[in-house]
Image: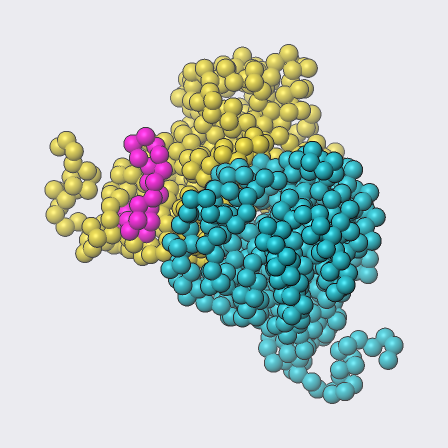
Chain colours: A cyan, B yellow
């Protein structure tokens, strides 16, 4: 019936159905029809069957039967954060290789250590990562790593939503690409539909042109998106030009990857010349930005303003904890605002509301999930978080957007809900036991971090 | 008796004296005789009469009688953080003027609003600031503002340590400078010695050369340090050169201020030419850096490497919450590491241990308190914090320094102790009631933020 909301349709079928979850008394971050962000006071959110049924007033839900209820007074409800690019199992290597240039970081530490990876380390690392992300208000993450069946198991157990891609190098031979495809096809829709999948070539500097072109073919044939690293830094772009006469983005274009749904991680080496190609890409093209790591390596940052000028969304990300030290998307949001103002030398750019747009709408578009997540609206999956606004560091409250982006911390997230299931409540994790996971992982660290002369899974040479 | 520690001397007087506070079972961040940072496992800290009596092992304090005990298992003890430059009452204006260039921020918002300041707003703002700082592990702050008797009252009530200066502009006539001196002389040593004071001219662009020279005279006459803003950004340096033919630092030098104990806030506009002057200053000269605000305004950052090359310590700071949005010194430490790597394009610079040196030794030197605070060592004031290392975002633990600087957040501080008094325990504030303070402040905000045409306390014109 035209105009009937899902809640109204539901009530027609059963006049007194209990909701699965009602959150009331909160302020809600909402998007209007043009995607502009606003804040509704004294709001309530009704969840049924894993979906947001209504966003209404607290008064309107008084007496509404509900299986579960969260008292949101003093809190703000908003869409769960989306980590658009990470390597979750790398939390096992958090802090293991510090204050180093990227060449030494890869060749002397990360890639030698990763030659010791086991399925167990991958799963325990991913579980610890899920715990960190749930406690920081992340409800969806895009992961690009190895032994991805173990990451899928961690996603299933944690209750999070994820897009997963099994990474490959051309040095692995055709099996790498085949494994990535096989995983993507058989894992799509797992965890009650919370898992989507992508093909995951590592990067243009570790995957040949022929393999990139073959990946583009497979993506089109199987309607799969592609998630890879490209133009990670300026040096990669310079070296690519020297070797191929093309930027990394032009290499992707020549391989046909800009005609697929493509998620490019980092892109700090994207140039002016690349913008028309990215703007005219026939596939969905997006860039994931994790600004903390770029500062730490002394790189440029993702050219957010230039990408905006050609309509390419930029999603927030953390990269892996071995370089970024945290999986804190809240920090990525704050740093995106601060660093973009700094590099553009323009304090009026990347306002708090723009930062929230990156965290919600643009991050959902980056993963191709804009119809499902990224806003609190009827029909969207019930992926939401509650943020405490009563701490001394967030008072007084003059401006909700500024408070969220510049004063609130990930530790202010009180509750994390995915598909209507409460994964954290009053900061207590309900699906994962951090102490047990960390203790099991700790036993495996000595064997993991023992570097053996010359053994590494790959050589970094941009 | 040569070689006897204070604890040994104490035991000789009374063989079974109860300690006031014992912290045991923790890891302790300690400095060796050359100031190098290390980490002692299974450590204990014994506090008597507000002073650190011993830093020893947990085994050594078994059975030691103590009035109070903190079980530090899973936690790290370190010196409390030092906020080397803030305007604590400005938390009342947190988020009120966002995404603006500094000229509009001052002239259209902050200085008009500050014409409505009341003593009550100053005290309530300072109290809320103290609550935020205690909960973020800050034990000492340097404050530069107006109505400083009210800030001193907040320091007394909160239990924090502070260096306070009553700010003045030359536009106030001689009374401004006289009030600053009067406050400094009569408040020195207040709050059981926790308060020290400084003279506080606002900046070379709001205080005349004659007033700067008079301030230098008073500082020498009364043995008072001076705390001011200078070379806050590159534009100020450029304008100073155009008007006076001198950089702001050269203006200070000509006024005789480099012969006083001088704390310079910001200094992002310090030039190569300034370095010899700063390096040869006969007074103690230090710079306080609050990198978050510089990113937000699109400024350069404090030239930490250049200042290090001439032996000038750089202390960590937050500035006021009206520009910085937080009083989170932990964030200042993390951002100092990240931003310095970025601007120097050198990932090996500003290592995690260097960042901890800025947070401890250099910040204590910046306030002239190096003999009293900044390290956990016998004879120092018992200003210390306990940091939780069991959260999923800090696991696993490969490197204490990296974990502290790049993974730990201010919200991981579990306990804050000043002069041996526990101000926060298990994250519960023991001296201040945030809800009551915030509620009283909220009533005064409408009158505070009502801007009246043309009224402002000062005009920003560098």
- Whether A421 is drawn above or below B221: the answer is below
Q: Is residue B43 magenta?
A: yes
Between residues B22 and B408, which one lies in front from this camera angle? B408
Q: Quadrant of residue B187?
A: top left
Q: Residue at x 74, y 88 (%)?
A: A14
Locate residue B430, reporting x and y percent.
41, 54
Regarding residue A100, the answer to whether it shows in the image is yes
Return the residue nearer the eye: B72 or B426: B72
Residue B282 image offset from top left, x and y in percent? 42, 16
Segment colored magenta: B26-48
Q: Is residue B415 left or right of residue A99?
A: left
Residue at the limit of the structure toward the front, as seen here: A173
Q: Is residue A265 left or right of residue A410?
A: right
Identified at 48% across, 52% down, the residue is A115
Rendered location of residue B299, percent (x, y): 64, 31
Give me the residue at 50% from left, 54% from top: A91
Q: Main secondary structure of the magenta part?
A: strand
Residue B374 in the image, given as x and y percentages of width and height: 37, 37
Q: Is residue A74 above or below residue A379?
A: above
Q: Nearer the viewer, residue A314 or B109?
A: A314
Note whether residue B191 is visible: no
Tell which of A457 and A226 is nearer to you.
Answer: A457
Left or right of A319 in this view: A378: right
Question: Eyeballing the image, is A255 above or below B201?
Answer: below
Magenta span contains residue B242:
no
């Amino acid at each position: 019936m035209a105009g009937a909301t899902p809640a109204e349709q539901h009530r027609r079928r059963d006049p007194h159905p209990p909701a699965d979850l009602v959150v009331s008394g909160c302020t809600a971050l909402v998007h209007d029809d043009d995607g502009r962000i606003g804040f509704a006071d004294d709001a309530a959110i009704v969840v049924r069957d894993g979906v947001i049924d209504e966003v209404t007033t607290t008064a309107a839900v008084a007496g509404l039967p509900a299986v579960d209820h969260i008292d949101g007074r003093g809190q703000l409800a908003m869409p769960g954060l989306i980590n658009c690019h990470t390597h979750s199992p790398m939390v096992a290597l958090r802090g293991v290789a510090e204050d180093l240039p990227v060449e030494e970081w890869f060749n002397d530490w990360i890639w030698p250590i990763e030659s010791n990876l086991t399925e167990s380390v991958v799963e325990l690392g991913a579980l610890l990562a899920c715990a960190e992300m749930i406690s920081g208000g992340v409800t969806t993450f895009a992961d690009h790593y190895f032994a991805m069946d173990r990451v899928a198991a961690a996603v299933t157990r944690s209750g999070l939503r994820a897009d997963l891609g099994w990474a490959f190098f051309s040095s692995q031979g055709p099996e790498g690409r085949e494994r990535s495809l096989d995983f993507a096809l058989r894992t799509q829709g797992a965890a009650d539909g919370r898992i989507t999948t992508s093909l995951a070539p590592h990067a243009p500097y570790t995957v040949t042109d022929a393999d990139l072109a073959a990946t583009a073919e497979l993506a089109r044939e199987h309607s799969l998106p592609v998630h890879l690293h490209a133009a990670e830094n300026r040096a990669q772009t310079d070296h690519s030009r020297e070797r191929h006469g093309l930027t990394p983005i032009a290499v992707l274009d020549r391989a046909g990857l800009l005609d697929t749904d493509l998620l490019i991680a980092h892109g700090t080496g994207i140039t002016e010349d690349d913008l028309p190609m990215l703007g005219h890409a026939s596939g969905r093209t997006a860039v994931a930005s994790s600004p903390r790591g770029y500062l730490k390596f002394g790189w440029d940052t993702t050219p957010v303003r230039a990408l905006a000028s050609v309509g390419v969304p930029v999603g927030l990300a953390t990269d892996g904890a071995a370089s970024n030290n945290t999986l804190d998307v809240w920090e990525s949001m704050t740093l995106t605002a601060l660093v973009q103002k700094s590099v553009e030398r323009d304090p009026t750019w990347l306002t708090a509301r723009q930062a929230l747009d990156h965290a919600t709408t643009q991050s959902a578009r980056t993963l191709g999930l804009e119809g499902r997540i990224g806003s609190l609206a009827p029909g969207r999956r019930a992926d939401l978080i509650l943020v405490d606004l009563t701490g001394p560091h967030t008072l007084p409250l003059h401006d909700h957007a500024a408070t969220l982006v510049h004063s609130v911390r990930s530790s202010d997230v009180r509750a994390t809900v995915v598909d209507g299931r409460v994964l954290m409540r009053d900061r207590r994790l309900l699906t994962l036991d951090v102490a047990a996971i960390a203790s099991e992982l700790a036993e495996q660290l000595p064997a993991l971090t023992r570097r053996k002369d010359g053994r590494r899974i790959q050589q970094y040479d941009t």
